[in-house]
Amino acid sequence: MRKSEVALDHKDLALSVAREAGELIKNYVGGQFQVEEKSSVFDLVTEVDRESELLIRKRINEYNPAHKIIGEEGVDQEDISILLESDDYIWVIDPIDGTTNFVHGLPGYSVSIALVHKKEVILGVVYDPSLDEMFSAEKGKGAFLNGESIHISNIHLLEHSVLSTGFPSDIEGARANVIKGIDEIAPVCSNLRSFGSAALHLAYVATGRLEGFWEYNLNAWDIAAGYLLVKEAGGKVSDLSGSPYHLTTRNILATNGQVHEQLLGRL
Ligand code: IPD
Ligand code: CA
Ligand code: CA
């Protein structure tokens, strides 16, 4: 994609920049890049995260200079409050979701891009460059994987459900809560998985590969795009006390709807 005379609609822009960022990230796999610790030794960032975010910001700015952008690697506290107050278009991006996987040469990282308008997520794109899987959803228009319609699973028993969670970097708070949850859920579900990218976990609930996903202390850039995928695929997303998802939800439960109440009761 190059700066063009032709306008790109929001969805085409999100799809093309997610793919472009995915290619950029993939080109570093197996090579050298700088890794730094952010809030703790468990919270990593690389120069590739920053490069990916710069690329996404640049493309959005080229086509929509008036739109605001909230990206994990360039965020400040004021940005978060505009999500709640502003009716403008706001892009919410995670330039690499699953940085720990990326650093370790594992697959299972993604680019997550959401567009918010009037405080609602209206577009969500999650791209997995390792598998070339592009998940997308627009409000009211369904959810898609590589252009094919996707739908949540039809499983209603926990004992038939494959569920997922993640391990947040906040060890004593959020990660301890996840571990308590695993204690409750592991004995009663078919199995548990943790792939290392919240955005991909949500995309997998949307495709019916997983029945549910929960995690604590996530941010809008981890979940805004995936939330819309699940919703448009027929699923349910709430916080862990059962209130409907909104842009500041950090403790999340996303399911096929059928196992939602059973999980809320146990988490
Ligand atoms: C992380 C991933 C991971 C989740 C962490 C997130 P990052 O995002 O989504 O799956 O368990 O809580 O922080 O740091 O790789 O963008
Ligand atoms: Ca993330
Ligand atoms: Ca990230």
Image: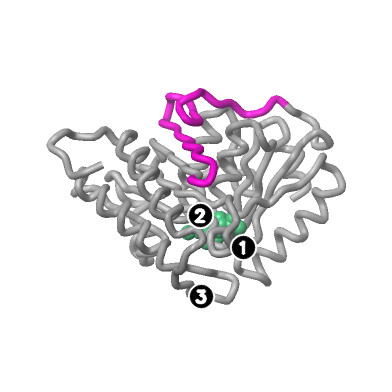
Q: Give the residue type at disc 2.
A: Asp
Q: Nearer the viewer, mark 2 or mark 1?
A: 2
User: Does residue 217 show up?
Assistant: no
Residue 137 part of the magenta segment: yes
Q: Is residue 236 above or below residue 218?
A: above
Distance, label 3 to label 2, CA atoms, is 15 Å
* Residue 37 tag number: 3
Q: Looking at the image, tell me whether mark 1 or mark 3 is earlier in sequence order.
A: 3
| Residue located at (47% from left, 68% from top) | 45
Give the x, y percent position of residue 245: 53, 43
Q: Residues within 10 Å of mark 1 (few under 14, many from 20)?
A: many
In the orientation shown, which residue stands out farthest toward the front? 30
Give the x, y percent position of residue 79: 34, 60
**Ligand 1 within 8 angstroms of badge 1 C-beta:** yes
* Residue 97 tag number: 2
Q: Nearer the viewer, mark 1 or mark 3?
A: 3
**Ligand 2 within 8 angstroms of badge 2 C-beta:** yes
Q: Looking at the image, tell me whether mark 3 or mark 2 is earlier in sequence order.
A: 3
Residue range corresponding to the magenta coloring: 129-154
Asked if labels 1 and 2 touch by Cβ distance under 8 angstroms, the answer is no
User: Does residue 240 show up?
Assistant: yes
**Ligand 1 within 8 angstroms of badge 3 C-beta:** no
